[in-house]
Image (cartoon, rainbow, N blue to C red):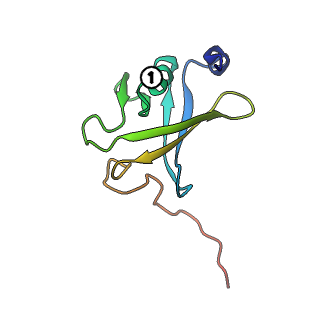
Amino acid sequence: MFDLDQLFQKSDLIPAVVQDVNSGEVLMLGFANREAVERTLETKTAWFWSRSRQKLWNKGESSGHFLTVHKVVTDCDTDTLLYLCTPNGPTCHTGARSCFFNTIWEEDDQ
């Protein structure tokens, strides 16, 4: 088993990118502390630390749109997580499938 202490050597809070395990689409970015990661591994649903509310939250606890976690990986620096998930409905609180839908720039193909 991976030593979770490695994840939190630089900070008590690390980014957690959520990606659809089937399509590869990036769905959201959250932040996780050690307890959130432990709960994610225990429950197989995505847990995060809410920076605005200063508390743990299980994605889907109020909407019913849980993220079933199939795999958790870390980057080469062990300071960012990637949750590979199956979403049970829209991931974004706006009702969109992904939180990433506001294009600010796109290469012109002309």
16 sits to left or right of 64? right
**Looking at the rendering, which quadrant does residue 39 occupy?**
top left
Extreme right residue here?
76
Left or right: 25, with 86 as reference point: right
Residue 6 sits above or below residue 97 on the image: above
Q: Quadrant of residue 105?
A: bottom right
Q: Residue at x 68, y 85 (%)?
A: 110
Q: Is residue 81 visible from the viewing direction of this image?
A: no
Q: Is 5 or 12 nearer to us in this picture?
A: 5
Placement of the N terminus among the 4 image quadrants: top right
Residue 78, horizontal then vertical, whole percent: 69, 27
Q: Nearer the viewer, residue 108 or 8?
A: 8
- The picture places residue 85, in percent across and down from the top left corner, at 48, 44
Q: Which residue is mark 1?
A: 42
- Circle 1 crowding by C-alpha within 10 Å: few under 14, some 14–19, many from 20: few
In the rendered image of this protein, does residue 1 appear above or below residue 91? Answer: above
